[in-house]
Image (cartoon, rainbow, N blue to C red):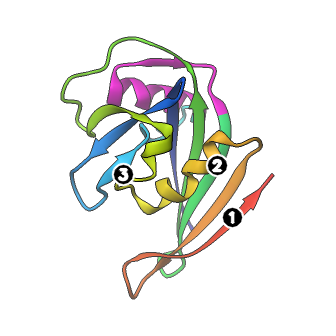
Amino acid sequence: MNYKFWTTCMIKDKNRVLLLNRQHDALKGYIPPGGKVEFPESFVDGAIREVREETGLAVRNLVYKGLYEFVNEEKSDRYIIFNYITEDFSGELLENPPEGEPTWIQIDKAMQLPMQVATKLSFPYLFEEGTFEMQIYWDIEQNQEGKVTVKRT
């Protein structure tokens, strides 16, 4: 079994959120800042580092909202993404960061934007009480997201 750990951190400012307009490689769309957790850092430290690298902002007081994972049974791969949200941030946005242009988007308009499937599916849960766990099975034949299950706590 191969495990890979990632994080996202939704930055909320009143009725808007900061999303990256990612337009490189096959994973295009608006996404929250985040990325791979480096060993041996904690998941929260990884989220804080990734936000700074991708946006220039310093975030604090992250609230855990849940996780989603991609499961590829054929390759025995499991990508686990820990999702956080915060309203506590400071700093100035980077110009031309590598992962995509940081853009403030009205929360009620965000779902109309092109997003990666997991981002679109998990987006509403980030603003609700409790946590979520989403499991997305990779459809090998179609080479895309397949069966999705969601559990709420």
Question: Quick check: is 47 in the magenta stretch?
Answer: yes
Q: Is residue 79 left or right of residue 143?
A: right
Place of residue 26 in the rendered image (x, y in percent of width and height, measured from the top left): 26, 62
Place of residue 132 in the rendered image (x, y in percent of width and height, measured from the top left): 70, 52
Place of residue 99 in the rendered image (x, y in percent of width and height, measured from the top left): 27, 40
Q: Is residue 103 left or right of residue 107?
A: left
Query: Quick check: marks 1 and 2 in contact, CB under 8 Å?
Result: yes
In this rendering, the answer to whether 18 lies above or below 37 is: above
- Badge nearest the viewer, 3 or 1: 3
Q: Amino acid at mark 1?
A: Val
Q: Which of the two residues, 39 or 143, is positioned nearer the viewer here? A: 143
Query: Which is nearer the N-term, disc 1 or disc 2?
Result: 2
SS of the residue under disc 1: strand
Magenta segment boundaries in residue numbering? 44-63
Q: What quarter of the picture does the N terminus occupy?
A: bottom right
In this rendering, the answer to whether 135 lies above or below 33 is: below
Q: Which mark is residue 125?
A: 2
Place of residue 86 in the rendered image (x, y in percent of width and height, measured from the top left): 58, 26
What type of secondary structure mainly makes up the magenta span? helix
Residue at 29% across, 55% down: 28
Query: Which is nearer the N-term, disc 2 or disc 3?
Result: 3
Q: Amino acid at mark 2?
A: Tyr
Query: Which is nearer the N-term, disc 3 or disc 1?
Result: 3
The residue that mark 3 highlights is 113
Residue at 74% across, 61% down: 151
Q: Quadrant of residue 83?
A: top right
The residue that mark 1 highlights is 150
In whole angstroms, how far apart are the C-alphas of marks 1 and 2?
Answer: 10 Å
In whole angstroms, how far apart are the C-alphas of marks 2 and 3?
Answer: 17 Å
SS of the residue under disc 3: loop
- Badge nearest the viewer, 2 or 3: 3
